Amino acid sequence: MEYIINKHGNGHLALGSDHPDYADYLYWFHFTNGSLQPALGRVMVVASLNVDDSNPMKQNLNTRLEDALKLVDERVKKNTWLAGKEFTAADVMIVFSFTTMRLFTSLDLSSYPGILSYLKRIGERKAYKTAMEKGDPGMKPLLGAESPELFEPLRLLRSK
């Protein structure tokens, strides 16, 4: 993503080092791959192993994920976009985690009103609608609170 933005972005979706929100942009641009996705991925793997809820490892992983979600929730309650007032690549990076990724791991967002408002703003963007139509024609955007039904192969694996 960073390569594409720098090579072909012509200044779009990124904030330069002289921008007042540059540090926030960098933090949130890397937050998805460095914190949120690993937390989601670990919870997904443990869920596929049918580990008991009382297992300390599972509890720790769920706490880490909850902490990451709370951090995002607080950020987008106070800011229109992750880096501040401008929509950036940081927002592009995180959307998959809150939408399509939820087909692979159960994630109810009811406790995160900031994230839900943020997803509403994302879903209202013309560019998001266009990208979804091109990339996943006919797929209903997963922008609500309730976790969608899991991807069938995962659902079958977990039922064993």
Image (tube, rainbow, N blue to C red):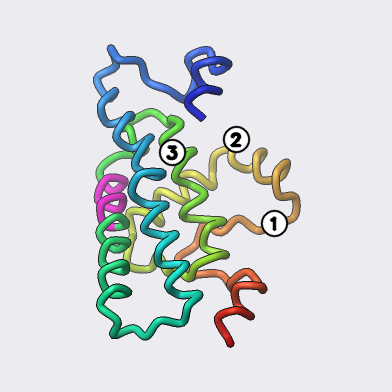
Please tell me which residue is depicted at 31% across the width and 67% down the height of the picture: 61
How crowded is the residue under tag 3: few (<14 C-alpha within 10 Å), some, or many (20+)?
Answer: many
Q: In which quarter of the image is residue 21?
A: top left
- Identify the residue position indicated by label 2 in the image: 127
Of label 2 and label 1, which has the lower sequence position?
2
Residue 90, given in percent of the width and then of the height, sits at: 41, 35
Q: Nearer the viewer, residue 39 or 98?
A: 39
Q: How far apart are marks 3 and 1 (CA)?
A: 20 Å
147 sits left or right of 117 in the view: right
Please tell me which residue is depicted at 51% across the width and 30% down the height of the picture: 1
In the structure shown, which secondary structural element does the residue marked by tag 3 occupy?
helix
Viewer-nearest of discs 2 and 3: 3
In the structure shown, which secondary structural element does the residue marked by tag 2 occupy?
helix
Q: Quadrant of residue 82?
A: top left
Q: Classify 118 as above or below 158.
A: above
Q: Tags 2 and 3 in contact by the CB under 8 Å rule?
A: no
Of label 2 and label 3, which has the lower sequence position?
3
In the structure shown, which secondary structural element does the residue marked by tag 1 occupy?
loop
- Identify the residue position indicated by label 3 in the image: 91
The residue range painted magenta reads 70-77
Of label 3 and label 1, which has the lower sequence position?
3
147 sits left or right of 31 in the view: right
- Identify the residue position indicated by label 1 in the image: 139
How crowded is the residue under tag 2: few (<14 C-alpha within 10 Å), some, or many (20+)?
Answer: few
Residue 96, given in percent of the width and then of the height, sits at: 52, 49
Give the number of the disc on residue 88: none
Q: Which amino acid does label 1 sit on?
A: Met
Q: Label the magenta part by its dominant secondary structure.
A: helix
